[in-house]
Image: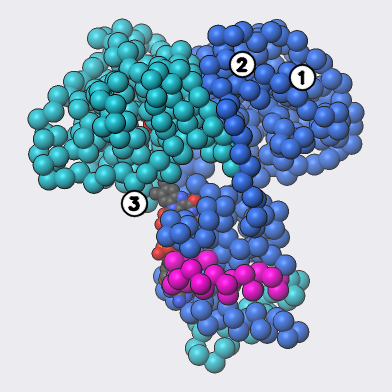
Chain colours: A cyan, B blue
């Protein structure tokens, strides 16, 4: 079984998000970018399936050259090889343009399964996987809490707002996973060393046969017109509890003033 | 150019329109002629309710197949409807199924889409303007280019649902669903007990974070919430720790809430948490750390130990 896992190099979510007000893009200082923690669940799922059924795990990312870092991390976890879709013309791509570039890289691999996370930590649109499934003409099974493959059938427990659904499709298929699929493994020292030597190929647009007008700023349908800061600091009242219960009287007074008690 | 046709992707939950879909008729009415798209069997009352919320027309496909197979039949039908009816704008709620349909439609039609919008408008030249949060401290104004319809997904509570009273016309959609689009089969649907807080509807939320120390201390919040007639919420840190189930979680990856009063106890105020509660009318924060970011959005900030303050407060309110 061949599994392609889409992974993204994102600004470390534990650091504050920065937006460049001039270029109107997220600031992505490569030194502060990591493998998207959500994507580790996709990598983990792929590794478990291949451990059970045999096969190969190929991690795929679209991003600047620094995104190699995220791919190496996924290979340190155990993925076999990596494809980086990278081209200056891809800068400024929106969901559709990203999906086109990833589809062009994944299509020739003819995977049995494509795995994505439900949403990325930086953009969190959650739209990429479905757009990719349409472009690759694959059935899409989403919000997976569990993923099982038997023969050529994939079965997924799909989280819903009020419970879950058991859904099924024939391979090849695209699946998006949630954090419920199981704790991602931590790369071992051996894994970290091995990852440095695992094959990683970088593909530009010319090789992929993607038209320039379909990607990057030019292909993007979504345009950011303006970004404005809205850091509103409420000038609220701050009181310090001094051990006498004075703050409780303050809270009561406030609740009265807004007619809550 | 006639009036803009604005379609609302309407999901049906337990034989009634999903509350997040109902919210979208408010902007749809403001921006043009509101129409609903309902794919799958539902009741007459559900269709009538759409009229009450301002749908002038419902495109209704009364076919059980839409519940038996996911996404692709919906996208195929929607694609044909778009081609024949040429709407200007499609609005999607933030539900899992709406997201699936919208995402596939983006690839299928080769259109752009805006996700996570919190406000929508057109400028005087007819350009679509969507407001989208961009990090914790910035809002972006985004537009879409290319052919119509434009596709936009709105965050929960971006608009309030308003029953305006009205009647709707129902237009039956009678498009055959091709077998080739029936690839993802629903084997079983399981409803899990929905016990727990209804955060979206609560006027008061008492929320707890890691500062409460351990799971048992959530009882203190429940008692305060009960005396105020409110519900209990939580930060992701305590959901991840297993103190309370996921449905308590407020924030970017949890619920978006807009209560009149939000009392944050032992919550630091991380941007992802704030993303889900910044719409609260009043905020009271109780935290031992005077530098906790949550104080920046508090109307009343109390620097102190939530474990002693909360029970005493409950007692005082009860004694009144
Ligand atoms: C992609 C992503 C999505 C996320 N989504 C969400 C989300 O949806 N919702 C969410 O909440 N978080 C989310 N987070 C996590 C978020 O970044 C924070 O880690 C989390 O909100 C912290 O929870 P907390 O405030 O309870 O804990 P902490 O940050 O540990 O804060 C605990 C606070 O309690 C105070 N305290 C300690 N003892 C006491 C006491 N006795 N009395 C009063 N105060 C006390 C401390 O001073 C501290 O400020 C997300 C993170 C990422 C990366
Ligand atoms: N640039 C990218 N490269 C590889 N995978 C991506 C990229 N962007 C998004 N994805 C995948 O799509 C998922 C959802 O992303 P998004 O639609 O941005 O929320 C991510 O978790 C990844 O699995």
* In this rendering, position of residue B31 left or right of residue A60: right
- Asked whether residue B191 appears in the rendered view, the answer is yes
Residue A12's place in the image compared with A154, above or below, is below
* In this rendering, position of residue B81 left or right of residue B180: right
* Label number found at residue B62: 1
Residue B26's place in the image compared with B63, above or below, is below
Residue B309's place in the image compared with A5, above or below, is below
Q: Residue at x 72, y 32 (%)?
A: B12
Q: In which image quadrant can residue A20 be found?
A: top left
Q: In which image quadrant can residue B223 be found?
A: bottom right
Q: Residue at x 75, y 75 (%)?
A: A261
Q: Which residues are magenta?
A: B208-228
Residues under numbered marks 2 and 1 in contact, where contact means CB atoms less than 8 Å apart: no
Secondary structure under badge 1? loop
Q: Tell me which chain the residue with mark 3 is part of.
A: A
Q: Are marks 2 and 1 on the same chain?
A: yes
- Asked whether residue A224 appears in the rendered view, the answer is no
The verdict on residue B224 being magenta is: yes
Residue at label 2? B73
Q: Earlier in the sequence, mark 2 or mark 1?
A: 1
Q: Residue at x 48, y 68 (%)?
A: B215
């Amino acid at each position: 079984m061949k599994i392609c896992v889409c992974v993204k190099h994102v600004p470390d979510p534990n650091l504050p998000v920065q937006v460049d007000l001039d270029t109107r893009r997220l600031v992505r200082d490569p030194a502060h970018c990591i493998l998207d923690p959500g994507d580790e669940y996709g990598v983990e799922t792929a590794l478990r399936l291949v451990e059970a059924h045999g096969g190969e795990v190929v991690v795929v990312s679209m991003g600047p050259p620094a995104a190699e870092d995220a791919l190496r991390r996924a290979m340190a976890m155990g993925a076999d090889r990596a494809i980086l879709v990278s081209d200056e013309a891809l800068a400024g791509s929106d969901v559709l343009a990203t999906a086109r570039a990833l589809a062009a890289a994944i299509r020739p691999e003819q995977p049995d399964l494509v795995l994505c996370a439900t949403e990325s930590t930086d953009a969190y649109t959650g739209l990429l996987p479905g757009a990719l499934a349409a472009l690759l003409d694959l059935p899409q099974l989403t919000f997976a809490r569990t993923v099982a493959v038997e023969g050529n059938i994939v079965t997924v427990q799909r989280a819903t707002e009020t419970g879950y659904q058991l859904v099924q499709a024939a391979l090849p298929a695209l699946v998006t996973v949630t954090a419920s699929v199981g704790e991602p493994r931590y790369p071992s020292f051996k894994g970290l060393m091995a990852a440095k030597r695992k094959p990683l190929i970088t593909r530009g647009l010319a090789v992929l046969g993607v038209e320039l007008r379909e990607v990057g700023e030019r292909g993007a349908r979504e345009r950011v017109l303006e970004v404005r800061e809205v850091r509103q600091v409420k000038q609220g009242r701050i009181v310090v509890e001094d051990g006498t219960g004075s703050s409780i009287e303050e809270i009561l007074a406030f609740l009265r003033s807004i007619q809550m008690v | 150019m006639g009036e803009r046709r604005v379609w609302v992707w309407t999901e049906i939950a337990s034989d009634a329109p999903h509350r997040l879909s109902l919210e979208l008729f408010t902007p749809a009415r403001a921006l043009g002629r509101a129409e609903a798209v309902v794919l799958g069997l539902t009741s007459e009352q559900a269709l009538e309710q759409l009229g009450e919320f301002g749908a002038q027309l419902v495109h209704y496909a009364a076919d059980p197949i839409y519940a038996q197979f996911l996404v692709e039949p919906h996208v195929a039908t929607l694609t044909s409807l778009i081609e024949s009816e040429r709407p200007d704008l499609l609005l999607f709620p933030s539900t899992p199924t709406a997201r699936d349909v919208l995402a596939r439609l983006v690839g299928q039609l080769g259109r752009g889409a805006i996700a996570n919008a919190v406000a929508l408008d057109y400028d005087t030249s007819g350009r679509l303007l969507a407001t989208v949060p961009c990090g914790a401290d910035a809002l972006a104004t985004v537009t879409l280019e290319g052919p119509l319809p434009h596709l936009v997904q709105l965050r929960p509570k971006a608009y309030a649902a308003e029953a305006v009273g009205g009647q709707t016309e129902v237009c039956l959609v009678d498009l055959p669903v091709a077998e080739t689009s029936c690839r993802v089969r629903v084997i079983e649907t399981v409803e899990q007990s929905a016990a727990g807080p209804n955060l979206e509807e609560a006027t008061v939320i008492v929320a707890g974070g890691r500062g409460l120390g351990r799971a048992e201390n959530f009882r203190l919040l429940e008692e305060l919430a009960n005396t105020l007639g409110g519900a209990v919420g939580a930060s992701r840190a305590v959901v991840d720790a297993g103190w309370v189930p996921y449905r308590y979680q407020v924030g970017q990856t949890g619920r978006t809430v807009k209560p009149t009063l939000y009392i944050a106890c032992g919550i630091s105020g991380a941007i992802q948490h704030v993303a889900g509660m910044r719409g609260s009318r009043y905020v009271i924060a109780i935290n031992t750390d005077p530098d906790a970011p949550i104080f920046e959005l508090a109307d009343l900030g109390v620097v102190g130990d939530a474990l002693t303050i909360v029970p005493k407060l409950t007692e005082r309110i009860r004694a009144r």
